[in-house]
Image (tube, rainbow, N blue to C red):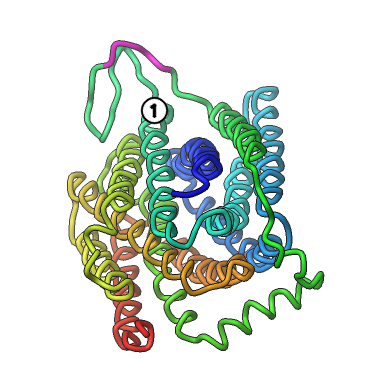
Amino acid sequence: MKNNKSLFLLFTANGISGFAQGISMLAVPWYFARTLQSDYFNISYGLLTVVVLVFGLYAGTLVDRFSRKKNFMVNSLVCGLLIGGISLGGYLNHELSNFLIVAVFGITMLNYNIHYPTLYAFGQEISHPDDYGKVNMNIEIVGQSSSIFSGAFAAILLEGIHSGKGKLFGFEMNFPFEINRWEIWEIFMMDAVTYFIAVALIWMIKYQENPKLKHQSNSIIQRVKVGFSYLKKHPEFMIFGLFSYSVFAMLLVEIHAVLPGYVEHHLNEGGSVFAAADLIYAVGALSAGLFVNKVFHSTNVVKAVIILTLITTGIFFWAFASNSVLVIYTISIILGFCNAGIRVLRLTYFFKHIPNELMGRVNSIFNMVNVLIRSLFIFLFSLPFFSLGDHVIWAYFIMATFLLLSGIVLILNYKKLNT
């Protein structure tokens, strides 16, 4: 690939910050599941998605209005200061309120709405068109490698290792050391520090800004309208963007709003199984980064996305019908491959078809709709029905049905999307 040094710094910054973010985003829902406050968290998560929905379009205008390098640095710096400040409060008071714990989750969610559109637009901007597939593959490989490490660390930090014994992948194991369970504010401090490391790495990137970014309108409304107008002229991109995001939407709902309750109340297991499922998911996602282009080298992007969406539909129906830790691990690795595979394929498709100066806004429109869908499902799964006994399994049935409908829409529009 051309411009290797800059891309290496970008990948590394994303990987380091993603490592601690992953632990925090696992620690928060598990904290509330362990303290029997999952309903509180799910309602809070639903409200946060509404905030993100409003913020999402504005985030896209920032990505396309200002230097991607400055966006990345300022965003990381602000998140590091905010999360570091909350963590410091935990150290001083030896506790954190539920509000502040959810606030860290919310800050990270808002960060994602600037971070990922900036990451993809930045990667597109500093790479050659011939390398788009490799760039997306490497973003996925680095990101998921970080998730694997964060999942492994989360499994240990959330439960600790006592008397040389601890759980990993849900199985009791012997360790030659002991680790006390980390307090949640200690996890947040590690998260904050990695943001500052990311700032330093991005600062070292040699970067020439896309000159078209300087000529964007200063009006937020006008900049948003440009993104919508582009998709109105290209409805095939709108259809593909919306429905190819369905697996990603259900993945986030599953990890944060469904899986903790599924593990706790249906499988009757502890935090190590929850963390291990996320780690195994990351292994599947990493394998997608390594092999998805090879697996589907003779299949066009749209057909490949349809296949992966239907596979995800099948495994969610399997989760509904199963009551096994090994099955949920199998489902997690397949889900990881399918979601990450769709993301690599979708981004390559968009890199080739959408101008760089519009990438932030177009991605934000898709993210906005995605957040709206997630919020509806999260509020639905916050109903008391899903907390009774093992009724949480019906959440998987509902998500599987939604994915099946999404796959059907893509199939019906296949010829239009593949032109």
Q: Is residue 178 magenta?
A: yes
Asked whether, in this view, residue 259 is left or right of residue 120, the answer is left
Q: Depth check: 392 or 319 in front?
A: 319
- Residues 95 and 377: in front is 377
Q: Is residue 292 magenta?
A: no
Q: Is residue 350 above or below residue 180?
A: below
Task: Report the front residue among 30 and 220.
Answer: 220
Vertical position of residue 50 compared to residue 199: above or below: below
Location of residue 13 (image quadrant):
top right
Percent from the top left, x then y, of residue 62? 71, 61
The residue located at (49%, 43%) in the rendering is 4
Q: Residues within 10 Å of mark 1 (few under 14, many from 20)?
A: some
Magenta stretch bounds: 175-179
Using the rendered image of the protein, determine whether residue 411 is visible from the camera's viewpoint.
Answer: yes
- Give the residue type at disc 1: Glu
Task: Answer left or right for 287 relative to 224.
Answer: left
Vertical arrangement, residue 140 with respect to residue 186, above or below? below
Q: Quadrant of residue 43?
A: bottom right
Q: Is residue 55 above or below residue 81?
A: below
Residue 134: x and y in percent read 39, 54
Residue 315, by quadrant, is bottom left
Q: Position of residue 61 (x, y in %)?
A: 69, 66
Residue sticking out furthest to the right: 218
Q: Residue at x 30, y 65 (%)?
A: 394
Residue at 65% x, 33% y: name it.
200
Quarter holding the C terminus?
A: bottom left
> x, y (%) of residue 374?
48, 66
> Which residue is under mark 1?
159
- Determine the residue positioned at 41% across, 17% down: 179
- The dominant secondary structure in magenta is loop
